[in-house]
Image: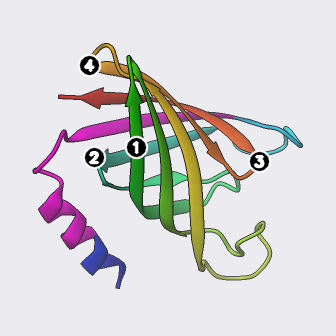
Amino acid sequence: MFKYIIVILLSSCCYADPAVVVGGWSHHIDDQKYRSHHEMVAFMNDHYAFGRFTNSFNRPTTFAVYRWTENVNNLEAAINIGFVYGYRSCLGDEGNKAVVCPAIVPQVTYTRYSLQPTVLILGNAVVAAIKYQW
């Protein structure tokens, strides 16, 4: 199923403002025992994003989301809603296999230049990344 979502997103990514997001350095609000570098690689356009990262429990994770964006001056605010696969449960890491979980991820990006600093909220983590818009 996830393969089909990726194909649909890839076919639509070339229509409007393609971008890539890399990095993923986090600060967890409740505890510092989690992984803080996430090796994220994501591809996006105006409405879709998909990619992979290493989650806070050190497990490979993939995601696909639909994006609602609003641009004001040099700031882009986005709400990303979709699915993530790689956590062992949707509210932590209990269990013995990865499951598909819903994802709601707020995002703010400074868009004045091609290299754009981005901040996301993922669960209890504030994540910084770099977006390249061409």
| The quarter of the displayed image where residue 50 is located | bottom left
Q: CA distance from mark 2 to mark 3?
A: 26 Å
In contact (CB < 8 Å): disc 1 and disc 2: yes
Q: Amino acid at mark 3?
A: Asn
Magenta-highlighted residues: 6-26
Q: Earlier in the sequence, mark 1 or mark 2?
A: 2
Q: Nearer the viewer, mark 3 or mark 1?
A: 1
In contact (CB < 8 Å): disc 4 and disc 3: no
Q: Position of residue 75 (x, y in %)?
A: 43, 23
Q: Earlier in the sequence, mark 1 or mark 4?
A: 1
Q: Amino acid at mark 1?
A: Thr
Which residue lies at the image location 20% right of the left edge and 71% below the top edge?
8
Q: CA distance from mark 2 to mark 4?
A: 15 Å
- 17 falls in the magenta region: yes
Q: Secondary structure at mark 2?
A: loop
Vertical side of 105 occupied by 9: above or below: below
Q: Amino acid at mark 2?
A: Asp
- Whether residue 60 sits left or right of residue 130 in the image: it is right
Q: Position of residue 63 (x, y in %)?
A: 45, 63
Which residue lies at the image location 34% right of the left edge and 85% below the top edge?
1
Q: Secondary structure at mark 4?
A: loop
Q: Earlier in the sequence, mark 3 or mark 1?
A: 1
| The quarter of the displayed image where residue 115 is located | top left
Q: Nearer the viewer, mark 1 or mark 4?
A: 1
- Whether residue 35 sits left or right of residue 25 in the image: it is right
Q: Position of residue 11 (x, y in %)?
A: 13, 64
Q: Nearer the viewer, mark 2 or mark 3?
A: 2
**Residue designated by label 1:** 69
Q: Position of residue 15 (x, y in %)?
A: 10, 50
**Residue designated by label 4:** 114
Q: CA distance from mark 1 to mark 2?
A: 7 Å
**Residue designated by label 2:** 46
